[in-house]
Amino acid sequence: MLKWSPWLDRFGAAVSATCGVHCAVMGAAFLLSPSIWLRQQSGHSGLHWLLVVEYGFASAAVCLALLALGLGTFRHGSFRPWAFGFPGLCMITAGVFSRLHDVPVLGSTVVLAGGLLMVLAHMDNLRIGRATHFNPGRDGPMVMR
C-alpha cells in the first residue's frame, strides 16, 4: 500500500523547480538567439531530444504532484496544498503540452509560474504532513499536533 512520505514532496518540489528553471532558461536562449528558435520551428535543428526532455520533466512533475498531493491529502485531510497545486498543474500542462509551448516567452513564463506554484504546493503539503500523524486507535483516524 502506498503511503505519504516527505521524500515524495521533496523530490516533487525539486523536479517542479528544475522543470520551471529549464523552461525559463530555454525561453531566454530562444529569445536571445532567434536563429535557434527558427531552426527548431523548421524542424531541422536536431533539437528533438530537447522536446523529449521537456515532456519528461513535465510528466514527472505532474505525476509526482498527483501522487504526493493525493497521498498527503489522504494523510492530513487538508485540501490547502491543492490551492497552489491545481493551478500549477494546469499551467505546466498547458505550457508544455499545448500550442502555447511554441511561443517562447509566453510558454516559458507560464511553465515557470506553474513550476513555482507546484513548489509552493509541495512545501505546504510537506509542512502540513509533518504536523499530522495517524493514530488509528482511540483518537480516530487523524490527530493534529
Image: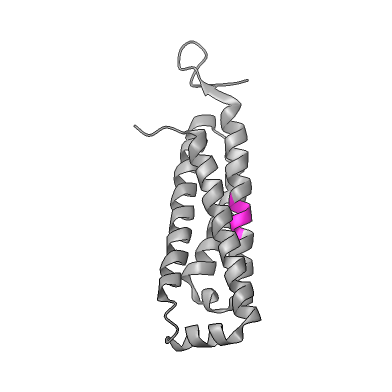
Numbered range of the magenta stretch: 114-118
Q: In this view, does 56 lie to the left or right of 34?
A: left
Question: Is 130 one of the magenta-colored residues?
Answer: no
Q: In this view, does 78 lie to the left or right of 62?
A: right
Q: Relative to 92, does residue 139 appear above or below in the rendering?
A: above
- Image quadrant in which you'd find residue 46: bottom left
Q: Can residue 83 be seen at all in this image of the molecule?
A: no
Q: Nearer the viewer, residue 52 or 101?
A: 52
Q: In which quarter of the image is the C terminus?
A: top right
Up-down relation of residue 39 to residue 102 (above or below): below
Compare residues 43 and 70 and report the one nearer the observer.
43
| Near-viewer residue (125 or 10) | 10
Q: Is residue 80 above or below residue 37?
A: above
In depth, the one of 50 and 109 nearer the eye is: 50
Q: Which residue lies furthest to the left in this view?
A: 1
* Residue 115 location (% of width, % of height): 59, 57
Where residue 139 sits in the image (x, y, percent)? 52, 14
> Residue drawn at (57%, 25%), measured in percent from left and top?
132
Coloured how?
one colour
Location of the N terminus (image quadrant): top left
Total labels: the figure holds: 0
Task: Name the residue at 60% across, 46% down.
Answer: 121
> Residue drawn 58% across and 51% down?
118
| Residue at 53%, 56% in the rendered image | 89
Q: Main secondary structure of the magenta part?
A: helix
**Residue 113, percent across and down?**
64, 60
Residue 64, visible in the rendered structure = yes
Percent across and percent down for residue 50 are 45, 71
